[in-house]
Image (cartoon, rainbow, N blue to C red):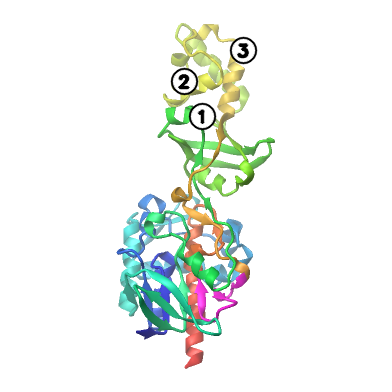
């Protein structure tokens, strides 16, 4: 069997590339190792699918951690607004929420994956559920096809869209890195990114499931140097902390060499220490004959207040009228700086994306083609490109897929 182009991987970037190629008249065959296409796409954004971010290319690049320069051609060549228009055209109405995050109106990630798959089929792409085990290169090192289930499929264009290592149950097991290395490309160290952070502190399991909104999270290293600061939402887990703020912070941290960090949470960022002191005084006076933990009821979520008092070294059973000025100061310091020591990141199995991948120095960033192997392209998370939460990483998938499809279409037309 032969065709103009073969795509390895039926996730976001693979499906999008297949659709763009097929609608341009390219005979394209897409191979996906899972029985379901877009398996990881179907669980993104907690099943709501934050598809992109409605921002300008300049704003987009400001939210990229690694590969900013390499993404210029891709993001200017296919913007978030282009993606929104494409998705709406295939039957995925979109809406924009806080932070310019773009979601399907249905708030169902399955709709996005299903519409993309259907669009590929309608455009003429052939979709096959077989795992690709090898990329075939000819004697010149150029792409010549793939091997799947022991069968050779020949094509002069092969696109690797296998994803990273995050969520391995969705099929992201690192095949693309192996393909790249066998084709002579360098692969950078792969680490979890946008991942929950772990802590050995007992307060975390005690607060498991508690979600905090409108807090400020600052992460400092062992020397007290600030590594991240942001305002928004987070939550406690039985093993540490997670949520949007924490995932974003994780991408800024380097745990190599056993580095440790502290997560410092300002639980009342909009209130000054003086204002907090006045509020505490009023609450303590109003409930002067109550235990402190009861007198301060309403100051914080019920599960958090006793934990905070414990961190402030205040016995919650003390009577409110016995709390000293120094004790109040300790409560205020803890309210403005609730500290959780971080022992490390969760495993890559729990990461939203993979940090690292195919080194962009070996990729033509204007086409996504390997500089060593003509006709061999790499797109999406398999590349050493990543950004913040908020739709930026899926936009990388869409933009690199579009850029590759455009270059492949031109290549094949020129060859006619």
Q: Residue furthest bottom?
A: 416
Quarter placement of the N terminus: bottom left
The label on residue 325 is: 3
Are the residues at dot 3 and dot 2 in contact (C-beta closer than 8 Å)? no
Q: Is residue 153 above or below residue 326?
A: below
Q: Earlier in the sequence, mark 1 or mark 3?
A: 1
The reply to whether the magenta stretch includes residue 374 is yes
Q: Image check: 186 left or right of 100?
A: right
Q: Residue at x 51, y 49 (%)?
A: 194
At which x and y percent is residue 67? Answer: 60, 62
- Write down the region rendered in magenta: 362-378
At which x and y percent is residue 326? Answer: 63, 14
Front of the two marks 3 and 2? 2
**Front position in the image: 370 or 316:** 370
The reply to whether the magenta stretch includes residue 198 is no
**Front position in the image: 222 or 133:** 133
- State how far apart marks 3 and 2 are (Cα): 19 Å
Front of the two marks 1 and 3? 1
Say which residue label 1 marks. 201
Say which residue label 2 marks. 306
Q: Is residue 256 in view from this perspective?
A: yes
């Amino acid at each position: 069997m032969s065709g103009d182009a073969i795509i390895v991987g039926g996730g976001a970037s693979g499906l999008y590339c297949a659709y763009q190629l097929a609608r341009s008249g390219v005979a394209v065959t897409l191979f996906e190792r899972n029985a379901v296409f877009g398996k990881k796409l179907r669980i993104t954004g907690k099943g709501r699918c934050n598809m992109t971010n409605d921002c300008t290319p300049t704003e987009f690049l400001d939210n990229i951690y690694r590969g900013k320069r390499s993404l210029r051609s891709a993001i200017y060549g296919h913007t978030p607004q282009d993606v929104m228009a494409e998705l709406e055209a295939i039957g995925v109405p979109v809406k924009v929420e806080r932070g310019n995050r773009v979601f399907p109106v249905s708030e169902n990630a399955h709709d996005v994956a299903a519409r993309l798959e259907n669009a590929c089929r309608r455009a003429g792409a052939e979709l096959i559920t077989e795992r690709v085990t090898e990329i075939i290169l000819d004697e010149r090192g150029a792409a010549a096809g793939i091997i799947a289930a022991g069968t050779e499929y020949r094509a002069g264009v092969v696109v690797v869209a296998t994803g990273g290592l995050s969520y391995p149950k969705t099929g992201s097991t690192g095949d693309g890195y192996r393909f790249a290395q066998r084709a002579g490309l360098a692969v950078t160290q792969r680490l979890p990114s946008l991942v929950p952070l772990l802590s050995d502190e007992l307060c975390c399991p005690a607060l498991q499931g508690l979600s905090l909104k409108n807090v400020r999270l600052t992460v400092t290293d062992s020397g007290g140097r600030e590594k991240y600061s942001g305002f928004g939402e987070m939550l406690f887990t039985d093993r540490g902390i997670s949520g949007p703020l924490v995932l974003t912070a994780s991408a800024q941290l380097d745990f190599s060499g056993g580095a440790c960090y502290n997560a410092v949470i300002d639980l009342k960022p909009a209130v000054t220490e003086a204002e907090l002191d006045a509020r505490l005084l009023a609450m303590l006076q109003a409930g002067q004959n109550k235990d402190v933990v009861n007198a301060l009821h309403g100051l914080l979520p019920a599960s958090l207040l006793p934990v905070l008092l414990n961190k402030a070294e205040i016995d919650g059973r003390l009577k409110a009228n016995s709390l000293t000025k120094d004790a109040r100061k300790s409560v205020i310091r803890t309210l403005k700086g609730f500290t959780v020591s971080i022992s490390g990141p969760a495993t890559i199995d729990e990461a939203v994306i993979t940090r690292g991948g195919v080194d962009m120095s070996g990729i033509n960033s204007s086409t996504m083609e390997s500089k060593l192997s003509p006709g061999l392209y790499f797109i999406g998370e398999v590349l050493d490109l990543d950004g913040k939460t908020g739709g930026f990483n899926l936009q990388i998938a869409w933009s690199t897929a579009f850029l590759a499809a455009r270059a492949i279409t031109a290549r094949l037309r020129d060859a006619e």
